[in-house]
Structure formats: structure tokens, C-alpha cells
Image (cartoon, grey):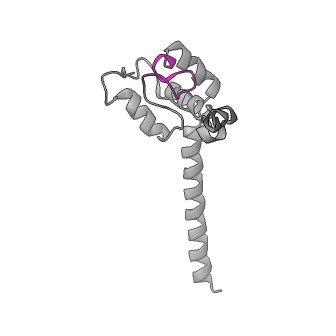
Amino acid sequence: MNSSMMGRLRKHLWIAAALLALGAAAQAQEAGNAASGKEIFLKYTCYGCHGFSGQNGPGARLVPMGMTQQAFTNYVRNPRTRQMPSYSTKVLSDAQLGNVYAYIKTLPRSPAAKDIPELNQFKEQ
């Protein structure tokens, strides 16, 4: 391998390392404190519409969370329905919403009906 090829290879390795670092930074930015998020979820009575499990109640199902953290933050700031109150940065910071997002991501998904033995027993009778 000549020096020109080595130089290009080094350049590509630096670019790859920089891209990996950016990806790691983006993931770290999305990581929040789930315990703090639970406190906020309870304090602002999110469970009133979304249920304690994030899956029941008159509000949208939060589990499984299909949004990115940024999309979640944008929605909470500017909801598409009048039933959902908006929460400005004066009420909840982006970091606090990141914590709520982290908490929601910890909530387990309910099992499918076919995976609940008691329901299958009723179906068989």
C-alpha cells in the first residue's frame, strides 16, 4: 500500500470514528433518568389519561413507544388534539421530557391475549 492510499485510509477511519462519536452523543442525549421521569409522570397526572401502564385510559397509548425522543418532545409541546394539554419549556424542560420518555420506555408491553392462559381457558369453554 503506498503512502497516498494510507493517507486516504486514515482519513476514512477518522470520518468513521467521528460519525460513531456523533451517534453515541445522540444516544446519550436521548438517555434520560427513568426514575425522575416516573415522578414527573405522576406529578403531572399523565396517568389520568394514559393509565399507570401507559396503555389504558382515554388518552393515546404510550406503550409501546413508537416515537423518537425528539418526536415525543415535539408532540408534548404541540399536541394535535385539544384533549392533550401542551407543556411549554416553562412547565417542563427538554431534559424533564427526556426523563419522562425514558420512564415510558421502561414500561412493559402487555402480553397478547393469546399469551394469557386465563383468557384461553374461557375461550375453550
Tally the marks: 0
**Near-viewer residue (75 or 58):** 58
Q: Is residue 77 visible?
A: yes
Q: Is residue 112 visible?
A: no
Task: Name the residue at 55% across, 51% down.
Answer: 22
Q: Quadrant of the C terminus?
A: top right
- The location of residue 109, given as percent across then percent down, is 60, 36
In the rendered structure, the answer to whether residue 75 lies left or right of residue 119 reads left
Q: Which residues are magenta?
A: 46-59
- The location of residue 71, given as percent across then percent down, is 42, 38
**Near-viewer residue (1 or 56):** 56
Task: Name the residue at 48% across, 16% down.
Answer: 48
In the rendered structure, the answer to whether residue 62 lies left or right of residue 125 reads left
Residue lying farthest to the front in this orientation: 125
- The location of residue 43, given as percent across then percent down, is 53, 13
- The location of residue 98, given as percent across then percent down, is 53, 31
Query: Is 44 rendered above or below residue 64?
Result: above
Tell me if residue 47 is in the magenta stretch. Answer: yes
Task: Name the residue at 52% across, 29% down.
Answer: 55
Query: Is 19 rendered above or below residue 123?
Result: below
**Near-viewer residue (59 or 27):** 59
Query: Is 104 rendered above or below residue 39?
Result: below
Task: Name the residue at 57% across, 44% down.
Answer: 27
Secondary structure mostly seen in the magenta stretch: loop
**Near-viewer residue (44 or 95):** 44
Q: Quadrant of the N terminus?
A: bottom right
Tell me if residue 72 is in the magenta stretch. Answer: no
